[in-house]
Image: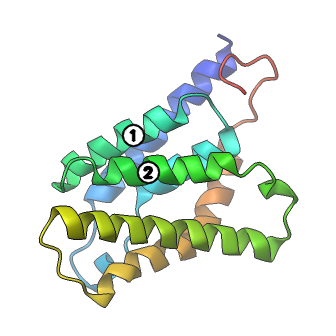
Amino acid sequence: MTTNDFFNIFLFFLFSLLAMILQLWAPSNWLGYFWPSWLLMVVLYWSKFRNCKGVLELSFVLGVINDALMQQTIGVSAVVYTLAAAAVLLNKRYINWAWWNRIAFWCLIFFGVKCVEIAMLAVTDDLSYRWTLWLNCLGNILLWPFIQKGLKQIVRPKAKSSIFSR
């Protein structure tokens, strides 16, 4: 392992910890409806832009941790995060798309994640459907470009001889 590998692993765990703290810090007023899924955005960033091995396993573990922290049914976020990371990893031609296609792709990912999450919660819990459930998805979509640009500025490019690269 190179020094850059350790640095990338350290940054992943640091951003995951920060995302967990932000996830717990959701405001209780109207802004709480728009509060994004911070951990989901970290998983999506690392699955697309860092392209490391083990992203699916880490997204599953982070989903279980998110379920425990948010006191939800264990496994719902784990399955949702894993499916979202898999959908992003399966799309190899993303970089060559036009900007409006990339926007549509990320909107589809966030809406798909919310649909799967609502369907799983409706089956496993006593979920009363309300339109405010979709405001979280809107918060994710509006904040994603800023998260993406900010993380690209912080995270260094990975080394060519990385043990974690594909």
Amino acid type at mark 1: Phe
Tell whether label 2 touches label 1 (CB within 8 Å): yes
Residue 115 image offset from top left, x and y in percent: 41, 71
Relative to 40, residue 55 above or below: above
Residue 94 image offset from top left, x and y in percent: 78, 57
Residue 88 image offset from top left, x and y in percent: 63, 52
Instruction: Write the residue at 72% across / 19% down.
Output: 162
**Image check: 19 left or right of 27?**
right
Residue 39 makes an appearance in the image:
no
Q: Quadrant of residue 119?
A: bottom left
Relative to 162, residue 137 above or below: below
Residue at which label 1 appears: 60
**Image check: 58 left or right of 3?**
left
Instruction: Write the residue at 67% across / 37% down.
Output: 51
**Image check: 111 left or right of 120?**
right
The residue closer to the viewer here, 93 or 52, is 93
Q: SS at mark 2?
A: helix
Instruction: Write the residue at 45% across / 33% down.
Output: 57
Q: Which circle marks residue 81 in the picture?
A: 2
Residue 96 image offset from top left, x and y in percent: 87, 58
